[in-house]
Amino acid sequence: MANKRALISVSDKTGIDAFAAELVKLGFEIISTGGTKTLFESKGIPVTGISDVTGFPEILDGRVKTLHPAVHSGLLSVRDSEEHRKQMQELNLGYIDLVAVNLYPFQQTIAKPNVSYEDAIENIDIGGPSMLRSAAKNHAFVTVVVDAADYPQVLEELRTHGDTTLDTRKKLAAKTFRHTSAYDALIGDYLTTKLGETLPERVTVTYEKVQDLRYGENPHQAAAFYKKPLAGAGSLANAEQLHGKELSYNNINDANAALQILREFTDEPAAVAVKHMNPCGVGIGSDIFEAYTKAYEADPTSIFGGIVALNRPVDAQTAAKLNEIFLEIVIAPDFAPEALETLTKKKNIRLLKLPFVPTEDKYVVTSVEGGMLLQETDKKQLTAADLKVVTERAPTEEELKQLLFAWKVVKHVKSNAIALANGNMTIGIGAGQMNRVGSARIALEQAGEKAQGAALASDAFFPMGDTVELAAKYGVKAIIQPGGSIKDEESIAAANAAGIAMVFTGVRHFKH
């Protein structure tokens, strides 16, 4: 028997034959199973079947092959324990010094359209995680490898030192436990979702690193960008960057906020401009040029250095308009060749290509110190039929359209939130003030004369009539709000006195 033994059984066979061949040169006996063993045999790499080690055949369609004392004693035995050495000798068991295992492709399986439940369950690996955990636990003596990217370092250390260093084995063990915990988290999430369970007693989440970031919100904060293993096609994590430097932490936050607003508008060309997680301009139009023009004109000052998201491909005319100011990011389903030619003349603008599809996230996670908050994603939509007219005057058809437009926007503005709309565009936005009339004052002052005949949306009810009274002074003609305040009658009376049409939604949209 060779001085050292390596157990290799991989689903992802990237580079495994070259790795095994080098191990053989270094004096390792290779033990393997199933398809991995067949591959080695086809490459002329000496290999011992697992059944020759265990003295027991692979059974139950391969479900049981490595779950055997001859495998796990070889992985778990403490090499400097006299008692362990004695037992290994008495039972004629051999040590296993290196394990290279990756797992059944559960993630790839459940990512397939219309995958059956039975197929998903069959692709849950049992023996693989067991071997990995045994080897990782005993990393004082055993090298465990789950990632082909680590093969070169392992081989180099074996050539140089005759073994891997303890520091390397510790790092590989930690990586292995991250690997198996992520694998189990994905299985748990799949089964929980299939059962329709919500807010279970335990939640385990797993993410994969997309990239390291230069820094976080501020230069003194380290940061990285991660994505869900099965992030949807419309996720920012799956965007194709066509031009510009790497995204920053704040870029990603703002871009995600822009996409969330944009998804409110599915039927017509729409453009959203965002600064510091709040919309500064939203517009819809007959084409994407008109939509972007409205978003720009909503607040030409704040859009400078902002993020723009569009739900239609960028054409040459729109690109020329976008190119007139400095923008950090433009996100769109596609860019015409002439649009790219125009926009890429600016070195720093980031261009992201991303399909415009509905979000698939069911929950929103917010971290708090020592814990997290989990809530359903706010996907509540309203139509005209959902609204209750509470004033003497009902909104006109055009006012109703602007009310619903403003309602879609105010949902994504930091509370307390007020959004003003007219002509299918925002004309004033008040965000994040400690009192609602303060937010209204900001929005109305921004709108100025444009507020004449405008629609006003509030994310929550009016605690008193002062917001309506202020809106009336600026000429607002229609208001949409949740209702439900003990002083609703005060607001209704103020609206009636000013000839304002007001509707209640019965739904609020707090966003903190």
Image (cartoon, helix red, strand yellow):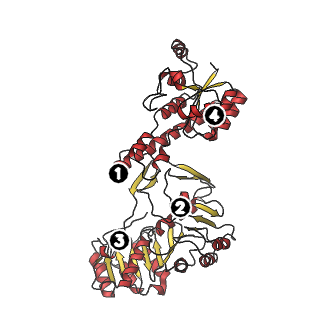
Disc nearer the start of the sequence (3/4): 4
Distance from disc 3 to disc 4, alpha carbons, whole Å, reads 56 Å
Distance from disc 2 to disc 1, alpha carbons, whole Å, reads 27 Å
Residue 55 in view in this figure:
yes
**Local crowd size for mark 2, using a 10 Å CA cut-off: few (<14), some (14–19), many (≥20):** some
Image quadrant assignment for residue 246 = bottom right
Q: Which mark is residue 382?
A: 3
Disc nearer the start of the sequence (2/1): 1
- Read off the residue under disc 1: 198
Q: Which mark is residue 168?
A: 4
> Which three-letter amino acid code belongs to the residue tagged 4?
Thr
Image quadrant assignment for residue 218 = bottom right
381 and 17: which is toward the camera: 17
Q: Residue furthest front?
A: 42
Q: Is residue 76 above or below residue 36?
A: above
**Tag 3 secondary structure:** loop
